[in-house]
Image (cartoon, rainbow, N blue to C red):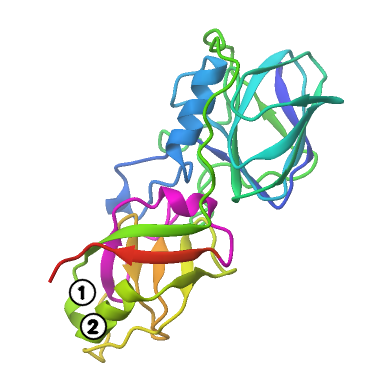
Amino acid sequence: MSAALEVLRAGALTTVQDLGRPGYAHLGVPRSGALDPAALRLANRLVGNPETAAGLEITLTGCALRFTRAVTVALTGAPADVLVERRPGDIGRPLSLPAGAVLRVGPARAGLRTWLAVSGGIAVEPVLGSRATDTLSGLGPPPLRDGDRLPLGPAAGRPAPVDATATPPVPARLRLELRLGPRHDWFTAAALDLLLSTAYAVSPLSNRVGARLAGAALPRAVAGELPSEGLVLGAVQVPPDGQPLIFLADHPTTGGYPVLGVVADVTPLAQARPGTTVRFHGPQR
C-alpha cells in the first residue's frame, strides 16, 4: 500500500462513503452512500477530486487520522474543531498536510455528521460499483476501527482556490415535506391530522438505516398486516407501536409495515441529533 490513511482514532462511527450504488434495489441492495450527498460533493470539489470519489462520513465524536503522503483534505457538514498537528484548520476550505501529518477532527459542536475528502479519494475495492459502507447489508468496507489503513488514489486535480465556503447552520427544528404513500388508507383520518399537527422528536435509536421518531402514536384503520413490499428512500413506515420511522440511505428495500407517506428530502435528517424536533407538512386532502 504505497499511499495510505492510517486510523489513529476511529470515533463512534466513521465509514467510507461515496454517492452510493443506485440501480440494485430489485436485488435487495439499497443505494447507501453519504447521508448528505451535497456535502460530500463539495468536499471533493474543494480538494480537486471527481464528485464521485469516496471520502469519510464522521459521526458526532470526531476521529484522528495520519497520512503517509502529502495530501489536501477538506471537511464539510457539522462544525467541529480541526487540528493539523497543532495548527488549527477550518471546515469548508482545503487544508494541505505534509506526509506523516496527523489530522484531528473534534466532536461536532452542532449537528451530527462531518464529511472528509482526501485528494485522490479513498481507494478501497468497490462493490457493485461503489465504495460505500452499507451498515445494514454489510456491503462495502466495514466501519473504521483504530489501526486500520485505507489506500489512497492518485490526486486527480488541483484544490479549489477558495479561502472559505458558506456552511449552512444546523437547524434546531426540522420541517419535512410529506407526500402520501401507498398505504395511507390503512390509517384513520385522525392519524394524518396528528402527523401534520404535532411535533415529533428524533429518537436515540436512529442510525443510517432510519430516523425513528417519538411522539403521538398514529392510529390504524386496518388492523391486519400485509406482505412485504418495496421501500424507497424517505418512506415513512409505521410499526405496530404507531411511532413513525423515516428510512435513510441504508434502508431495507422491502418491508411489511404500512408506509403512510414519503418524505421529499431526507437530507436535513443527516444532522438531526436525538431530541431534534421534526414537523411534517404537505399532503392536501
The front one of 132 and 185 is 185
Which residue corresponds to the image point at 26% horizontal and 66% vertical from the top-left? 261
Is residue 260 located in the magenta-colored stretch of the structure? yes
Is residue 178 located in the magenta-colored stretch of the structure? no
Which residue corresponds to the image point at 24% horizontal and 80% vertical from the top-left? 226
Residue bearing the label numbered 1: 183
Which residue corresponds to the image point at 47% horizontal and 54% vertical from the top-left? 269
Residue farthest along the right direction in this orientation: 86
Label 1: which secondary element: loop
Mark 2: amino acid: Phe
- Residue interval drawn in magenta: 248-275
Residue 149 occupies which quadrant of the picture?
top right
Say whether marks 1 and 2 touch (CB < 8 Å): yes
- Per the model, the C-alpha gap separating discs 1 and 2 is 8 Å
Label 2: which secondary element: loop
Mark 1: amino acid: Arg
Residue 144 position in % (x across, y down):
68, 44
Residue 19 position in % (x across, y down):
43, 36
Compared with 251, 118 (above or below) is above
> Mark on residue 110?
none
